[in-house]
Image (spheres, rainbow, N blue to C red):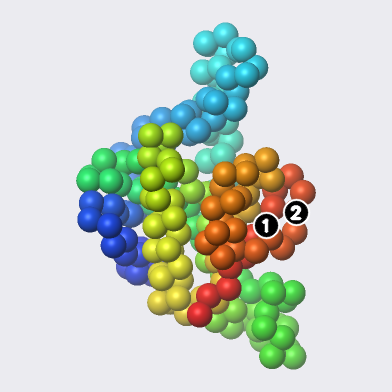
Amino acid sequence: MSSIAAHVRLPTPGLAIRPAQAADDAFCRRLSDATLQAMFASMGLPGPLLATLLEQQFEAQRIGYRRSFPAAEYFVITERGVAVGRVVVTIDPAEAGLCDGSDVDGEAAARSWGNRALRIVDIALLPAAQGRGIGREVIAGLVRAAEAIGLRRLTLSVQSSNGRARSLYLRLGFIETEGEGYLHMTRRLG
């Protein structure tokens, strides 16, 4: 079990995070389709073309995450044993510009475990599970897990056009650090 999975606890009865398994691939595809379909609906594509586009987007995301975040950990969010979402996280090395400034030697700070961040690569919920506090609770569980293993920050990126998610992250204590199409956000821990 990963160091992250060993520390994630969600207090709401029936809500849990577990490591993703090969058997979850069909759910992850269905989740991807559900989250992307609304975005593509306005294009008025014929059914077969839309299905092809959704499959290509799913595969592109899967390949992109594996290339960009080779050490990422994949989890399924369940409610009463039923999959309702997914979260992908990785531990990022410290970034010189985001260290406390107390260590003059930036290379030493970058090697320090305590200056590393837990990056939320992706979090997605089925539309029926959105707006019920599940995302907030999952992020709170990730905060506790990151603190338990000695990390100092949570980071994520969100599309600037995704006002709903952006608003949630700001309410949860994240601050915007940079970006245009995608906004990079950080929350200091401890």
Q: Which residue occupies the foreground of this view, 169 or 71? A: 169
**Residue 130 locus on image (x, y percent):** 43, 41
**Residue 57 locus on image (x, y percent):** 57, 31
Which sits earlier in the primary sequence, circle 2 or circle 1? Answer: 2
Q: Is residue 171 above or below residue 7?
A: above
How many numbered dots are placed on residues in this image? 2
Q: Is residue 69 above or below residue 175?
A: above
Residue under the point 30% across and 47% down: 78
Question: Which residue type carries mark 1?
Answer: His
Residue under the point 28% across and 62% down: 11
Question: Which residue type carries mark 2?
Answer: Gly
Q: Which residue occupies the foreground of this view, 28 or 158? A: 158
Q: Secondary structure at mark 2?
A: strand
Q: Which residue is at the far top?
A: 46
User: Circle 2: is it few (<14), some (14-19), or many (20+) Cα within 10 Å?
Assistant: few
Image-based side of 4 in relation to 189, left or right: left
Q: Which mark is residue 179?
A: 2
**Residue 70 locus on image (x, y percent):** 54, 55
Question: In this figure, which residue is indicated by the disc labeled 1?
Answer: 184
Q: Are marks 2 and 1 in contact (CB under 8 Å)?
A: yes
Q: Is residue 126 above or below residue 153?
A: above
Q: Secondary structure at mark 1?
A: strand
Q: Which mark is residue 136?
A: none
